[in-house]
Image: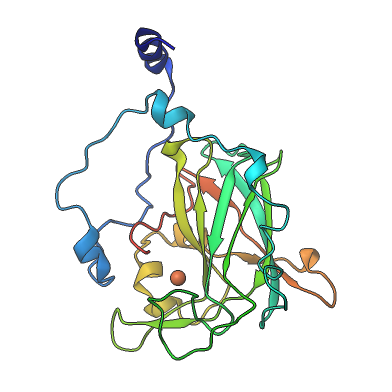
Amino acid sequence: MSEERAMRQSNEITGYRRDHESQPPYLYPDYQSTRLRAPDRPLVILPHTLTEVTGPVYGHGKVGPLDNDLTRQHAGEPLGERIIVKGRVLDGDGRPVRNSLIEVWQANAAGRYTHHNDQHPAPLDPNFSGAGRCLTDGEGRYRFMTVKPGAYPWKNHPNAWRPAHIHFSLFGPAFATRLVTQMYFPGDPLFDQDPIFQSVNDPKARERMISRFDLGATEPEWALAFDFDIVLRGRDATPVEKNHT
Ligand SMILES: [Fe+2]
């Protein structure tokens, strides 16, 4: 495409909805790493041009049929409470986001990550790596089989523990819809002391980070189920995790 034509098209492009005020701030002093990572100058608002609105594009070929089953990546089964995590990905207008890549990562049932930075005294599980991915279907639905992650300590403040959570990374249809967030479990007793959860100020937005137990989707004698819809951008957007690694 000629540069001139690309410019002309970009002028006609409708951008995605911008961040809403319910998103957490970049700087939240109780969450210590935000003090180092938060930008200290006002953000520059970039226009949504062809680049932001059309990429990236992934083919189906690279995502394997078992990539969404974290319990079948090794010779044996991982320890822990087997769960199904599923839901829909929606855009800022409530429409399904189809054929869109979702990646997840999480601690094992004992609260330990398979990562050299995590050395706290909980056991690793040789049958659990804790990472998976899938594409949404034609109605924006996704589904993972995994085990429920344990809570884990971190050194943010004295005796700090993270509520059980699963990290989600979504690309949506374009770079401008990229979303990294964490899914929590209903009724977790650790919410009140967790500055990452608390950095989302709006109570309704916090609710959007908590999955819903779904008895109807459980598999008898096999797995519990949690439902977690994700909204990319706009007023009802799922809060973005802006600082966690
Ligand atoms: Fe984590």
| 126 or 164: nearer the viewer | 126
| 57 or 169: nearer the viewer | 57
Q: Residue at x 30, y 78 (%)?
A: 156
Q: How is the image coloured?
A: rainbow
Would residue 90 appear left or right of 141 to someone viewing this image? left
Q: Residue at x 29, y 70 (%)?
A: 31
Q: Residue at x 45, y 44 (%)?
A: 178
Question: What quarter of the picture does the C terminus occupy?
Answer: bottom left
Q: Residue furthest front?
A: 75
Q: Residue furthest bottom?
A: 121
Question: Where is residue 215 shown, x and y percent of the image?
Answer: 76, 69
Q: Toward which corner of the image does residue 143 lie, by quadrant?
A: bottom right
- Which quadrant of the frame does ligand 1 lie within? bottom left
| 213 or 138: nearer the viewer | 138
The relative height of residue 27 versus residue 150 in the rendered view (above or below) is above
The relative height of residue 4 versus residue 87 in the rendered view (above or below) is above
Would residue 2 appear left or right of 151 to someone viewing this image? left
